[in-house]
Amino acid sequence: MAESEKVIYPRIPESNWWTLRDQFKKTLPNSVNVNYLKSLLGLGSDQAARNVIAPLQKIGLIDDDGRPTSLANEWRHDATYPEVCQKILVEVYPQELRDLYSGSGLDRDAVERWFSLSAQLGQGAARQSAALYMLLHDGVPKSSTEFSKTRSNKGESKSRAKNAKSTSSSRNKSDGADSKSAQPARSIEVSTPQLEQQIGRNSDLTLHIDLQIHISPDATAEQIDQIFASIARHIVKKDYSS
C-alpha cells in the first residue's frame, strides 16, 4: 500500500452492532443485503444500508457476497465473542494504535484524536471510528436491550446533571437579585421646635413618634431631604392643641 493511500477504518453504530448480533443469535441469514439491513435496522435509504455492509465486510463478518462467515458464527455466541473481537482488532487496526491504547481505562478523547490525525478524519468520522474500536477493545457481549437501557441511564444522568446546574445557576441569580432589592429599614425619631412648642402648651400631653422609613440606596441627597421635609411638614400641620 502506498504511503499516500488513505486507510479507511470501519464505522458501525453501536445500536446497529447489537441489533444485528441479536438477530444473528436467532438465526444466521443466507445473505446480508440492502433490504435485509433496511428491514432489520429501520434504515431509510439503500445508501445507509450499504454504509453498514462495507464495514461488516471489512471486519470479516460477511464475505463479498454478503454471506455470513465462520467468524460471524463465533461472533454471535457469548462464549466466543471476546475472542472474535480480539481477532478483529489484530486484523483491522495497526499495531501502533493497539500499543498506544489498550488495557483498562481507555481515554476516548485520545483515541478519537489518533483517528483524526492518523486517518485524516473529520470530528464525526473520528468519533465513530473510535467508538467501534473501543467497543471491540471492551469485548463484553451484551444484548440490544441492555445497550438501550445503558444509554437511557446515561442520558438521564446527563439530564439530571444539566438540570441541577441550571437550578443552581438560577438560584444564585435569584439570591443576588434579592440581596440587591432588599434594603435595610431605617428607624428615626423626629422632633421639631414647632412640635415641642405645641406639646409645651399642654403640660399633661406627652407625645412620642417613631417613624420607620425605607429609603432606597439609589436615592440622592436631595430626595432624602425632601422626604424628611415632607414628614416634618405634615407633623407640624397636625393640631394637638385641643
Image (cartoon, rainbow, N blue to C red):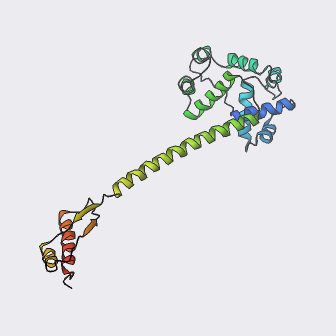
The picture quadrant where one finds residue 100 is top right
Total count of labels: 0
**Lateral position of residue 75 relative to residue 223, left or right:** right
Q: Nearer the viewer, residue 45 or 178?
A: 178
In this view, 80 is above or below 201: above
- The answer to whether residue 9 of the structure is visible from this angle is no
- The residue furthest front is 204
Residue 222, percent from left and from top:
17, 66
Residue 128, percent from left and from top:
62, 31
In this view, 24 is above or below 193: above
Q: Nearer the viewer, residue 208 or 109?
A: 208
**Lateral position of residue 159 relative to residue 173, left or right:** right
In this view, 52 is above or below 88: below
Residue 193, percent from left and from top:
12, 73
Q: Quadrant of the N terminus?
A: top right
Residue 221, percent from left and from top:
18, 63
Q: Quadrant of the C terminus?
A: bottom left
In this view, 120 is above or below 172: above
The picture quadrant where one finds residue 69 is top right
Determine the residue positioned at 66% across, 38% down.
Answer: 153
The picture quadrant where one finds residue 203 is bottom left
- The answer to whether residue 186 of the structure is visible from this angle is yes
